[in-house]
Amino acid sequence: MTRAYIVGAISAIERAGASDRDVGEGASEETIQRAEEMLRLRFPPSYRAFLMAFGYGGTPEAYVYGICDSFDLTEPAAPNVVGINIEERRAGHPDHVLLIENRGPAGYYALDFSTCDQSGETAVIEWVPGADPRATQPRVADDFGQFLLERVAAAHAGKAPAAA
């Protein structure tokens, strides 16, 4: 089902009008591999598909961190998923949680690599900086594809996604 989710999410973003989306031009396999090496993890297949299609972005209400070939991956500024997470790790952020979307005062949405399944997919969780990394965090989606499709659909409906 993950493939259907990510295909649906990418299609929904592509169908959004130019004023309703802000996306990159996609990242090359080489850039994705370099980002994975820098973060010492392997991105889930659905997140890799998003990175290849857009690199970063989405809609104003559902804006996902990512990478593109022109980024300085060490720069800790949105939407650079590598630089932001490396900077957060220096401040004590756990390695198994990858921040992918800023929720403002509510924290972040994040990929939880401690939940990696046989296909390489990870759950998406709500993460608040300073949270106990051993504590179970609220699960938003079973994988990134489901999360992105629900975020884009919720953005168009004007509401936030429900916890999984």
Image (cartoon, rainbow, N blue to C red):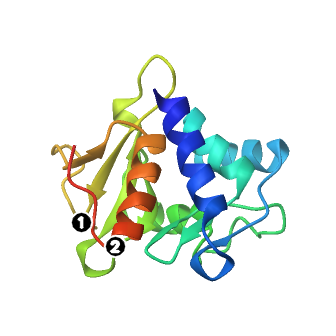
In this view, the residue farthest toward the top is 118
Residue shown at 32%/73% (left/top)? 158
Reply above or below: 95 against 13.
above
Would you call the spot at circle 2 few (<14 residues within 10 Å), some (14-19), or many (20 or more)?
Answer: some
| Quarter of the picture holding the N terminus | top left
Would you call the spot at circle 1 few (<14 residues within 10 Å), some (14-19), or many (20 or more)?
Answer: few
Label 1: which secondary element: loop
Name which of mark 1 and mark 2 comes first in the sequence: 2
Q: Is residue 40 in view from this perspective?
A: no
Circle 2 residue: 103
The one nearer the camera, 8 or 137, is: 8
Residue shown at 77%/57% (left/top)? 26
Q: Going by the image, does 102 lie left or right of 75?
A: left
Reply above or below: 156 against 40.
below
Q: Is residue 62 in view from this perspective?
A: yes
Closer to the eye: label 1 or 2: 2
Residue shown at 41%/59% (left/top)? 153
Going by the numbered disc 2, the residue's amino acid type is Arg
Going by the numbered disc 1, the residue's amino acid type is Gly
Label 2: which secondary element: loop
Circle 1 residue: 130
